Amino acid sequence: MILQLLIVLGALWVGSRYGSLALGAISGIGLALLVFGFGLKPGTPPTDVIYIIIAAVTCAGIMQASGGMDWLIQIAEKLLRKHPDRITFLAPLTTFFLTVLVGTGHVVYTLMPIICDIALKKGIRPERPCGVASIASQVGITCSPIAAAVVAFVSISNTNGFDITIPQVLMISIPACLCGLMAAAGASYKRGLDLDKDPVFQKKLQDPEQYQYIYGSSATTLDKVIPQSAKNAVFIFLGALAVIVFFAIFQEALPSYKTLRAVQDANALYINQDLAVTGDQLVKANVYLEGTTEWFQKKLPMNVVIQIVMISAAALMIIFCKAAPKKAVSGPVWQSGMVAVVAIYGIAWLADTYFANYLNEMKFMLAGVVAKYPWSIAFVFFLVSVLINSQGAVVVAMLPLAYSLGISGPVLLGVLPSVYGYFFIPNYPSDIATVNFDRSGTTVIGKYLLNHSFMMPGLICVSVSTIVAYLLSLIIY
């Protein structure tokens, strides 16, 4: 069991070192070793979550291809430039809500150079807004109605008897994460030396080439002319989100369809497409025995609703908003989303294979701790996230285990913000890009790796967000 766990952790560690598609692909090596080498029964890939990610990322990618993302960035830039002295608080709010809208944190790449430029022109140390803004771009994932982490939490929770909807999750996660972000921004407000008192920065300015590099250019989107078709694409996207939230709140309005369900009797029981007859014998069956099933009306599941609405919205943008599908495929939103699909596919399948085969042992080892301190599962979520760089993958891989250990749904909802821990080791693309965008050189990855610009705001944000979410969940549920 320990050796196989080391294989799982090793696959995750190696995958995180290579990054991108390697996260999912190298998990396949770990899966092969467990299945072919140790004879473990393969787990189940999280196909429902993967389908939702594909639909949502396709829709967001088409919106980006139409120019709609440029309009959103332009609106955010206008807000930031109107209040440059509040950049440390406003920058994380803009990156946070952009992520909430589109379901991915990779939209930060366009906005981060603008944040840095505004801070420099105002004489504010760019590390202050840039560090917390990068954190905010990822924190927004647990607050987005179309993000994999939120959808997976709802789907898995409903399966395990915690009947909750997407809006109910957002009612906890959004205020909690906003509290965490503002706490991190407050701690960053006077972080480090002011630029005019920083000897390292002032020494750079004495070099004409460095001075020209730092102050010689300006990043902006305000000179872009946004066509009406791009704005229409944003309206379609927001309309799709509104439809999803509407059905999530008013589920009685969902369409229903006629289907069969099992009826238990003395001789037969239909379970998961297996027909159990007379004792322990299981017989695969393609037909139903008379009297074992009945017709009933079933509501359309929310995961299917999200897929239908997102794909339809993408089609409307292509037809009416001049969005080029080829441009969408080459855009950063679609590409990063597909990388997330592969990561979740490989990581969650590997984790499910391991934990499903050792569920009883896990219960024996952890049941005492989680029974006395159920909130301690937050540390497990955080540590796993440090390894696998995907909040959606953490939820898909670890939430079923948490429920099997007897942890209640409200507790797990309360610790949902803890699934973001991959800022701890600064190898995530948004953090690396932020370091490169900061022309002043104040946003850094330190000499000792962990003393980087994202550690302090990340720890404060996740800690405060988790505590607030936990208290809110206990109060409401």
Image (tube, helix red, strand yellow):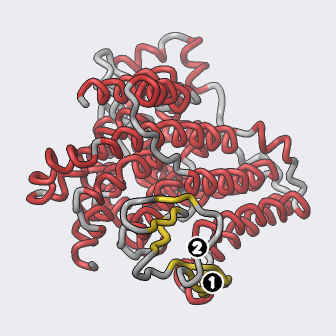
The label on residue 74 is none
Q: Residue 426, percent across and down?
A: 40, 28
Residue 274 in view (yes/no): yes
Residue ID for mark 1: 254
Crowding at label 2, few (<14), some or many (≥20) Cα neighbours within 10 Å?
some
Position above or below: 356 against 450: below
Position above or below: 303 against 67: below
Identified at 27% across, 78% down, the residue is 477
Q: Marks 2 and 1, Cα distance to the nearest angstrom?
A: 8 Å
Position above or below: 162 against 43: below
User: What amino acid is at disc 2?
Assistant: Pro
Position above or below: 8 against 124: above
Secondary element type, mark 1: loop
Identified at 35% across, 72% down, the residue is 162
Q: Is residue 299 left or right of residue 1?
A: right
The label on residue 301 is 2
In the picture, the quarter occupied by the N terminus is top left
Q: Quadrant of residue 453?
A: top left
Identified at 52% across, 82% down, the residue is 249
User: What amino acid is at disc 1?
Assistant: Leu
Q: Is residue 349 left or right of residue 70?
A: left
Q: Residue 337, percent across and down?
A: 62, 44
Q: Nearer the viewer, residue 191 or 242?
A: 242
Q: Residue 229, percent across and down?
A: 86, 61
Q: Residue 31, percent across and down?
A: 46, 30
Q: Nearer the viewer, residue 53 or 276?
A: 276
Q: Nearer the viewer, residue 118 or 75?
A: 75
